Image: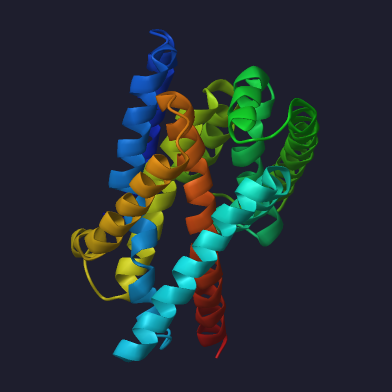
Amino acid sequence: MNKPNYTQLYLCGFLIAVLSLFVNLEQYTDYFLVLLALVVIALGLPHGALDFGVAKSLKLVDSFTSAIGFLSIYLAITALAIGFWIWQPNIALVIFFAISILHFSADWRDALPRIMRISLASVIICGPSLINASAVTEIFTDLFLSFDETTLVIFSMRVIFVFSILLILGFTVYSILQKRYYSAWQLAEWLMLIISSVVLTPLLHFGLYFCLLHSPKHLHDVSGLLNTSVTKAILLSLPFVLLTLIMGVGLYVWLGSGVLSVDLLRWIFIGLFGLTTSHMMLISIWHRSTRRLSSK
């Protein structure tokens, strides 16, 4: 499957999500969050579970000893990140947004200049703060932030969103004047991401982007790096997905509050923060290595 097909898949998911608003899907909070957790596990986790294969391609793993060392460091960084969130949730949230914007911007590294990639990723992260501020507030307070901290973060998100939109509009005008055109599918993808960030509820918006666009694109890139099919790449990721599930269940048993909706939301995000920290550090090394090879 090529990347334009992923765009089509995302657009179909977006249209279904818009229709779901008319039946108020998220009012069934527990069921929705269980479904979101299952979808993230099935479609989202495999894209990070291939990190071991990426490490091998970078020669970071070339023996049993180095494999144990890599996994130990990877899991230690994940555990430290989760612990840091529990200790300083407000700072951790800001860090999570920053690394997510940098990481997600790589989805368009071959299509857009860096400033525009970061602007689009910033819109994806910050858009929900506009008309869904109450839902964002509920999420952030569930993630251990105080109301005052949440208010400040939401205000900052709105400022970043407006600034990013202005940059995107300016780039659009500049591209037209320079007669630099993009495909209809690319334009549709970027426009729907902007609309989704504002119109859809935060969890629907994030789930659609993460599971139907970001993860498939990354799987496509990594399967090419590993000289294998996307299907085989997913199968290779299953042991690491299982390990992640065991860690998630352990966190729930150890730190769960007893309220299913709160626990699922809390540990999906905090768990993703931990995994994203390790994942992004490795992928950044990979992208730098790729750039060095392509410049030779």
Q: Quadrant of the C terminus?
A: bottom right
Q: Nearer the viewer, residue 109 or 54?
A: 54
Residue at the far front in the pictured view:
254
Q: Position of residue 43 (x, y in %)?
A: 31, 46
The number of discs equals 0
- Residue 33 located left or right of residue 243: right
Q: Residue at x 47, y 41 (%)?
A: 255
Colour approach in the figure:
rainbow
Q: Determine if residue 189 is in view.
A: no
Along the line of sight, the residue nearer the viewer: 136 or 128: 136
In x, y percent, where is residue 159? 80, 35
Which residue is at a point 68% across and 27% down the rendered structure image? 129
Question: The N terminus is located in which quarter?
Answer: bottom left
Please state the horizontal and vertical placement of residue 289, each as a whole percent of the image. 52, 82
Left or right of 175 on screen, residue 215? left
Q: Is residue 208 above or below residue 116?
A: above
Does residue 2 appear left or right of residue 74 in this picture?
left
The answer to whether any part of residue 32 appears in the image is yes
Q: Quadrant of residue 68?
A: bottom left
Q: Is residue 199 above or below residue 157?
A: above
50 lies above or below 102: below
State the residue in front, 14 or 48: 48
